[in-house]
Image: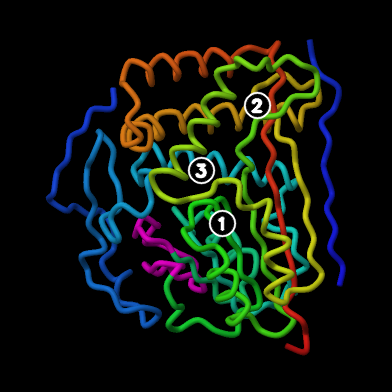
């Protein structure tokens, strides 16, 4: 079995969230999304609830602490564009056969990745699963979206050529269970790939000091997710060993140190840095709305923290970076 890691280095450096709950469900989405044979759910999953001034999914309410509204759509779109920039236009790293027949995207969110894969691989049926029905109605003919919980049994899932997940794994209560389900539902020889941020700010030149507000923000975010929701945002670090224990082979990992801000000299990394700056900026509001509030943080403290982080994000003299791990592996051809 091959189990390796590659770290992508950086170049040289260049010099009111009020609690407002509404119990009435609303929906702007196609109700047919709940009628798939993949799972048995009712049209109530199309509902949403407004809380802390943001919109959240109502199905399995309380499981996922981030919103699913237009502001979150902007952040997810930026994140998708940023990862395409990181991978120079590619959508994944696993050596999936170009004639793959079945692909599944776990925690598909607004569906950008699944739709683009469907366009790029017309031979494949691409299924995206998410707790919220927030995907577009008009789709390529080979793409479908399903409302379901990926931590439950995949009632109609089997024989996939490729199982994909991006920035979802950290928000699972039982990641090994999902990895085990993926192994069972992959074809022999099929591939799995996870892409996740590792939420610990790094720096290569001491410009990020110990009292930096960005360090404090990520420290508080990790604590809030773990204590309030039982979610380990650093779990991606354990995924290679978990894949090996489950029976996967040819385990590979790449770690990209993504610059935060437009401080790099090199154009490619500067573009990534601008994306990261905006993604984190949007994340500030999402964290202030529910996770920090439910963690008991004072509103004035949260506002001060957010102001300090935004100041850091626009300071070119601070050369912060955030790791992103991409891990892929294969189910044995003889399994």
Picture layout, residue 159 above or below residue 304: below
Q: Is residue 179 magenta?
A: no
To which residue does mark 3 refer? 77
Q: In the image, residue 148 lies at what x, y percent? A: 38, 69
Image-quadrant location for residue 96: bottom right
Q: Is residue 306 left or right of residue 262?
A: left
How many neighbours does mark 1 have within 10 angstroms: few (below 14), some (14-19), or many (20 or more)?
many
Magenta stretch: dominant secondary structure: loop
In the image, farthest residue toward the front: 227
Mark 3 or mark 2: whose residue is earlier in sequence: 3
- Secondary structure at numbered mark 3: helix
Helix, strand or loop at disc 2?
loop
Q: Mark number for residue 171?
A: none
Spatial CA distance of label 1 from label 3 is 10 Å
Q: Which residue is mark 2?
A: 260
Dividing the picture into quadrants, the one containing residue 29 is bottom left
Mark 1–mark 2 CB contact (< 8 Å): no
Range of magenta residues = 130-151
Please say if 315 is above or below 215. above
- For marks 3 and 2, give the CA distance: 17 Å
Residue situated in front as seen by the camera: 309 or 294: 294
């Amino acid at each position: 079995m091959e189990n390796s890691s590659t770290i992508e280095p950086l170049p040289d450096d260049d010099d009111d969230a009020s609690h407002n709950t509404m119990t009435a469900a609303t929906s702007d989405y196609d109700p047919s999304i709940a009628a798939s044979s993949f799972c048995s759910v009712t049209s109530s999953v199309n509902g949403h609830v407004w809380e802390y001034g943001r919109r959240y999914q109502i199905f399995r309410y309380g499981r996922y602490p981030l919103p699913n509204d237009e502001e979150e759509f902007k952040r997810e779109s930026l994140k998708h564009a940023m990862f395409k920039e990181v991978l120079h236009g590619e959508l994944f790293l696993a050596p999936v056969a170009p004639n793959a027949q079945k692909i599944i995207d776990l925690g598909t969110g607004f569906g950008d990745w699944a739709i683009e894969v469907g366009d790029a691989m017309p031979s494949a049926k691409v299924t995206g699963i998410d707790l919220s029905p927030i995907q577009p109605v008009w789709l390529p003919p080979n793409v479908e979206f399903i409302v379901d919980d990926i931590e439950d049994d995949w009632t109609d899932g089997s024989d996939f050529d490729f199982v994909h997940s991006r920035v979802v794994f950290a928000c699972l209560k039982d990641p090994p269970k999902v990895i085990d389900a993926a192994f069972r539902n992959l074809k022999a020889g099929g591939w799995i790939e996870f892409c996740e941020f590792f939420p610990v700010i790094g720096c290569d030149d001491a410009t990020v000091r110990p009292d930096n507000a960005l360090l404090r923000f990520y420290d508080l975010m990790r604590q809030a997710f773990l204590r309030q929701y039982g979610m380990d945002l650093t779990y991606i670090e354990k995924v290679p060993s978990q894949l090996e224990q489950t029976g996967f082979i040819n385990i590979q990992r790449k770690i990209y140190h993504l610059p935060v801000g437009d401080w790099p000299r090199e154009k490619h990394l500067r573009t990534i840095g601008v994306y990261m700056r905006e993604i984190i900026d949007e994340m500030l509001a999402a964290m202030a709305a529910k996770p920090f509030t439910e963690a008991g943080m004072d509103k004035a403290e949260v506002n001060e923290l957010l102001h300090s982080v935004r100041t850091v994000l626009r300071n070119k003299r601070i050369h912060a970076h955030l790791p992103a791990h991409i891990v892929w592996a294969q189910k044995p051809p003889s399994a």
